[in-house]
Image: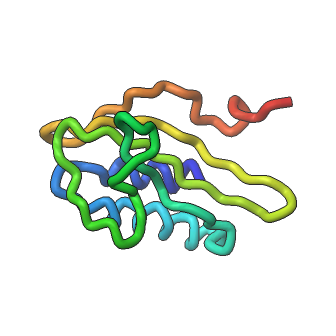
Amino acid sequence: MLEAQTAALESARPGLKCSEIDKIARKVIKKSGYGHLLRHHTGNGLGIEGHERPFLDTGDDTQLMPCMVFSCEPGIYQLGLGGFRHSDIFVVTEDGIELLTKYPRELSELIID
């Protein structure tokens, strides 16, 4: 999941379609053998509502533009067991993105005992 998020964040830039970011994240998860555990989109726009359009999802061809803010949170979920996703927030800049969150990225730092 972290590899999927990293790939999505590294690809995000002005002009790229939201659906392309989702496709990139899903490809990593499927290649790892966890495609059957995908349950939702890679992320969503943030603004007044918190979770709003545009979505980093299949079928959303909105192009990223400077000053747009998104969550990037691809996740995998096993019914009856649980799931895992890591949500980070980014803003689109003129030439890429800037991460606004600074959460730990190592799995051992994210486990709640």
Looking at the image, residue 101 sits to the left or right of residue 70; the answer is right
> What residue sits 45% from the left and 44% below the top?
51
Towards the viewer: 65 or 51: 51
Looking at the image, residue 38 sits to the left or right of residue 78; the answer is left
Q: Against 37, is 75 above or below?
A: above
Q: How far across and down, in percent of the image, does residue 48 sit?
A: 36, 34
Which colour assignment does the render follow?
rainbow
Q: How far across and down, in percent of the image, does residue 72 sit?
A: 45, 46
In the rendered image, the quadrant that contains the C terminus is top right
Q: How far across and down, in percent of the image, does residue 82 sit?
A: 79, 53
Looking at the image, residue 45 sits to the left or right of residue 108; the answer is left
Q: For residue 32, what is the image quadrant?
A: bottom right
> What residue sits 45% from the left and 27% below the top?
101
Q: Against 71, is 20 above or below?
A: below
Towards the viewer: 60 or 100: 60
Q: How far across and down, in percent of the image, does residue 47 sit?
A: 35, 36
> What residue sits 35% from the left and 48% below the top?
10
> What residue sits 54% from the left and 54% below the top?
74
Q: Against 100, is 91 above or below?
A: below
Please identify the residue farthest to the left as the structure is shown. 94
Please identify the residue farthest to the front as the structure is shown. 49
